[in-house]
Image: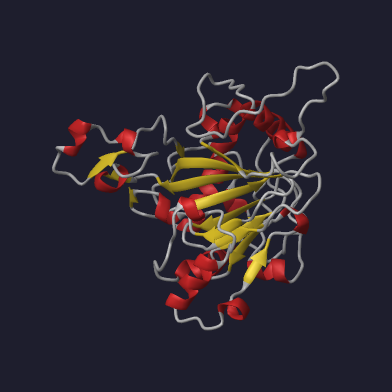
């Protein structure tokens, strides 16, 4: 995989000013300040078009049950089955058949890196882990907790505004997400949107995964804003869209930053994105919380629950260390930004 380019960082102010190129005054220090103040930063040219094209094709293979690492993801939608009848054309990206009914649901894959080598190489890129750790002030480094593909065929609904942190049962409880665009994020595709500064709000209302596709995609957001004492949230909140971000661009956001996306209003174009969720290198599972999670409970064995300790170590195989200060020769020298 070609090197990750994290030398072109943009802040919320850059986006609002319409800047798409590197501001010469942007340094790691200024990006860190912006990340901690606004809750996110953006790198518009992180991944090459060749790598994006490969990932798009590999995603189609995974959606059809073709795994080159020998194991399936932790969660996948119903597999796409292309017609074998003579004269029938193959289904398009994400199984889209030219209609906006049967194949208009949002597709979610959890931990695609476990089944595919290309996604695994991207998810464990040292340069990404290092940037996450430095922006977040994680002294011991960064560990991959999970990845998620959210893919929207034409006509598929919006994704409700939410936070990522409540879905991770670790201590310390820090979470940072790297979101990677696998398509050019035109307005009609429903690009990612951030609520600037919302990572500073209290816990408030978090919702659950079952509420991701509510008809009112901002209901939970406005409820949380009201708990913060923000009146008239519809007009007061500063919501910043990543419309215009090219395929291969990425954003890094705090796990408590509220974010969501609109419907894919395109008639014929897919909207694909990959989220990489990172946690501090030294995290441990909180046993009682992990036992309640369908995804995490398998890591807490029965014999572990009898131990007096409220926490348990995470296995390196499934939660790989991506970057620590001890690692040398990273793909990109962050200090040079």
Expressed as whole percent of the image width and height from the top left, the position of residue 39 reads: 53, 64
In the image, residue 111 sits, relative to residue 72, either above or below, namely: below
Image quarter in which the C terminus is found? bottom right
Residue sitting at 64 percent across and 25 percent down? 64
Q: Viewer-proximal residue, 234 or 9?
A: 234
**Residue in view at x 25 percent, y 32 percent:** 301
Tell me where residue 332 sits by quadrant: top right
Q: Residue at x 58, y 31 (%)?
A: 78
19 lies left or right of 164: right
Q: Is residue 100 visible?
A: yes
Residue 89 vs residue 113: left or right?
right
Q: Please, which colouring scheme is shown?
A: secondary structure
| Residue at the front extreme, as displayed | 101
Residue 324: percent from the left, percent from the top? 44, 42
Query: Looking at the image, is 41 positioned above or below residue 178?
Result: below
Q: Toward which corner of the image does residue 30 lie, by quadrant? A: bottom right
């Amino acid at each position: 995989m070609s090197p990750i380019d994290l030398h072109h960082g943009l802040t919320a102010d850059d986006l609002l000013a319409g800047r798409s190129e590197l501001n010469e005054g942007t340094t790691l220090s200024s990006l860190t300040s912006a990340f901690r103040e606004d809750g996110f930063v953006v790198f518009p040219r992180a991944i090459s078009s060749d790598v994006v094209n490969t990932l798009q094709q590999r995603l189609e293979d995974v959606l059809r049950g073709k795994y080159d690492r020998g194991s399936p993801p932790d969660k996948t939608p119903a597999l796409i089955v292309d017609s074998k009848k003579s004269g029938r054309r193959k289904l398009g990206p994400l199984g889209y058949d030219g209609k906006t009914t049967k194949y208009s649901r949002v597709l979610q894959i959890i931990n695609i890196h476990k089944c595919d080598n290309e996604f695994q190489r991207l998810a464990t890129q040292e340069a990404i882990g290092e940037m996450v750790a430095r922006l977040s002030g994680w002294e011991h480094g960064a560990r991959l907790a999970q990845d998620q593909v959210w893919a929207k065929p034409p006509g598929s609904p919006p994704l409700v505004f939410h936070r990522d942190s409540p879905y991770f049962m670790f201590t310390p409880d820090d979470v940072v997400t790297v979101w990677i665009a696998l398509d050019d994020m035109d307005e009609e595709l429903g690009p990612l949107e951030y609520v600037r500064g919302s990572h500073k709000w209290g816990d408030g209302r978090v919702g659950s995964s079952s509420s991701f596709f509510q008809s009112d995609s901002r209901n939970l957001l406005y409820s949380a804003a009201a708990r913060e004492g923000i009146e008239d949230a519809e007009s007061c909140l500063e919501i910043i869209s990543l419309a215009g971000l090219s395929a291969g661009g990425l954003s890094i956001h705090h796990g408590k930053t509220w974010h969501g996306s609109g419907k894919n209003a395109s008639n014929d174009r897919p909207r694909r994105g990959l989220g990489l969720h990172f946690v501090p290198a030294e995290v441990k599972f909180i046993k009682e919380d992990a036992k309640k999670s369908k995804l995490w409970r398998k890591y807490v064995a029965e014999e572990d629950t009898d131990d007096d300790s409220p926490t348990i170590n995470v296995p390196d195989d499934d939660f790989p260390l991506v970057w620590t200060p001890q690692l040398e020769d990273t793909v990109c020298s962050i200090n040079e930004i």
